[in-house]
């Protein structure tokens, strides 16, 4: 977003916000995201929990994916008008990424805004806490005016405090709602079956998933592609299947797919794919936290570790703090995938999960609802509280 785009959009939203402030605030829960065209991850789990635990409470889904290009930006700006209206007239507004109506001006004291982010733990530096400062205008407006931030564990509270410029006492380690999935054996089995039904070639084979994160910011986000898919495929037995899943924010057309037996739809939920994965090959993706709960082999392809430590930076020392096998090139991946090398240190995995995901008891969504959605809202919705 350019400075001019931000100035115009912020001015319009501030005027509309002032007008919407004249309207009554309702006991409504809004779940807003600029990431995808439909809710997923934390917001999807929270929506289900609100509907289950607070029946009758109005719960509005507000997925507003950001698009580049003039037409996409104009459409996004138009949709943000509804976002500003709901922000100024609802008691609880939950986001999982930066969301412009929240950041342009302070909201009413009758409204609580909670940031849950879309990934657990503290692995790579993000938000306002990157090694290199954000460019303007993002440096000024991004991640302002949150009342609370909800994270996965005590370990993440301090980093998330800096990333979202909120006092650390306003960062609550209630757990990451999307990780409730890993405490639900039936949900995991269903997910694995869904993935295999869509990609039947996975059935009965050792599934090796390559799922790296992106590099860069904004439109400059790119897929580094450190893995030579053709060389790796040639080194694997026929009983293995090599699968690629790129980050959903990347343009699939810019990603090399040579050598991969299956290319997973980038929009598919990564947790569903992990349920069907036997070995994960990644780099600096926060999916390592969730994958660690499965106690399955992990390979970290981090040939650019020194560069990544410099920008954006890491909260963990990959040389001593990480689980799995750390390698620097395709040859290292091939060696790490040998049956004799794919062992799991159960104790190390358990400690890693406890440090970064907390208890992982399957109740993170429930804790969120109990903390932020009073039972009285259900009574109001039913009309039983009317005098």
Image: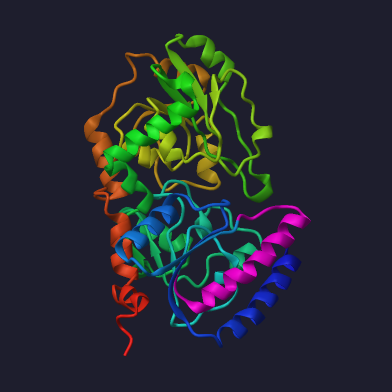
Task: Identify the image quadrant of the C terminus.
Answer: bottom left
**Quarter of the rendering occupied by the N terminus:** bottom right
Tell me the quarter of the picture where residue 187 sits. top left
Q: How is the image coloured?
A: rainbow
Which residue corresponds to the image point at 46% horizontal and 9% vertical from the top-left? 238
Q: Position of residue 15 (x, y in %)?
A: 66, 81
Residue 173 horizontal side relative to residue 84, left or right: left
**Compared to 44, does 242 lie above or below?**
above
Q: Specify the farthest residue to the right.
A: 70
Residue 108 picture location, percent across and down: 49, 82
Work out whether 346 lies above or below 11: above
Q: Is residue 359 visible?
A: yes
Q: Residue at x 27, y 49 (%)?
A: 362
Question: Per the image, is 69 magenta?
Answer: yes
Q: Residue 311: horizontal and vertical position, in percent?
A: 56, 46
Magenta stretch, overall SS: helix
Residue 179: percent from left, percent from top: 34, 47
Q: Is residue 5 left or right of residue 339?
A: right
Is residue 208 toward the left or the right of residue 141 in the image?
left
The boundaries of the magenta stretch are 65-92
Count up the numbered dots: 0
């Amino acid at each position: 977003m350019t400075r001019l785009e931000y100035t115009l959009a912020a001015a319009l939203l501030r005027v509309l916000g002032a007008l919407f402030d004249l309207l009554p605030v309702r006991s409504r829960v809004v779940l807003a995201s600029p990431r995808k065209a439909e809710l997923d991850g934390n917001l999807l789990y929270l929506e289900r929990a609100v509907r289950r635990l607070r029946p009758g409470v109005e719960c509005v889904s507000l997925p507003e994916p950001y698009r580049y290009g003039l037409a996409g930006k104009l459409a996004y700006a138009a949709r943000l008008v509804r976002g500003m209206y709901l922000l100024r007239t609802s008691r609880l507004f939950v986001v999982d990424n930066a969301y412009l109506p929240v950041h342009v001006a302070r909201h009413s004291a009758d409204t609580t805004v909670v940031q849950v982010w879309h990934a657990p733990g503290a692995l790579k530096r993000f938000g306002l806490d990157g090694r290199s400062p954000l460019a303007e205008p993002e440096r000024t407006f991004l991640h302002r005016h949150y009342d609370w931030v909800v994270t996965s564990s005590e370990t993440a509270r301090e980093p998330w405090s800096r990333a979202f410029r909120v006092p650390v006492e306003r960062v609550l380690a209630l757990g990451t709602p999307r990780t409730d999935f890993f405490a639900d054996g039936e949900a995991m089995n269903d997910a694995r079956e869904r993935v295999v039904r869509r990609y039947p070639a996975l059935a009965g084979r050792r599934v090796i998933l390559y799922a790296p994160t992106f590099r860069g910011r904004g439109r400059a986000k790119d897929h580094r592609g450190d893995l030579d898919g053709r060389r790796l495929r040639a080194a694997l037995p026929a009983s293995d299947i090599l699968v690629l899943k790129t980050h959903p924010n990347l343009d699939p057309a810019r990603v090399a797919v040579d050598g991969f037996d299956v290319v997973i739809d980038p929009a598919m939920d990564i947790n569903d794919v992990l349920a069907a994965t036997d070995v994960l090959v990644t780099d600096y993706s926060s999916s390592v936290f969730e994958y660690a709960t499965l106690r399955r082999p992990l390979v970290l392809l981090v040939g650019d570790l020194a560069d990544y430590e410099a920008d954006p930076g890491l909260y963990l020392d990959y040389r001593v703090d990480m689980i799995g096998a750390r390698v620097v090139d395709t040859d290292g991946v091939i060696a790490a995938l040998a049956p004799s090398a794919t062992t799991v240190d159960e104790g190390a995995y358990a400690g890693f999960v406890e440090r970064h995901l907390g208890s992982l008891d399957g109740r993170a969504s429930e804790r969120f609802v109990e903390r932020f959605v009073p039972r009285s809202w259900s009574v109001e919705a039913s009309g039983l509280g009317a005098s």
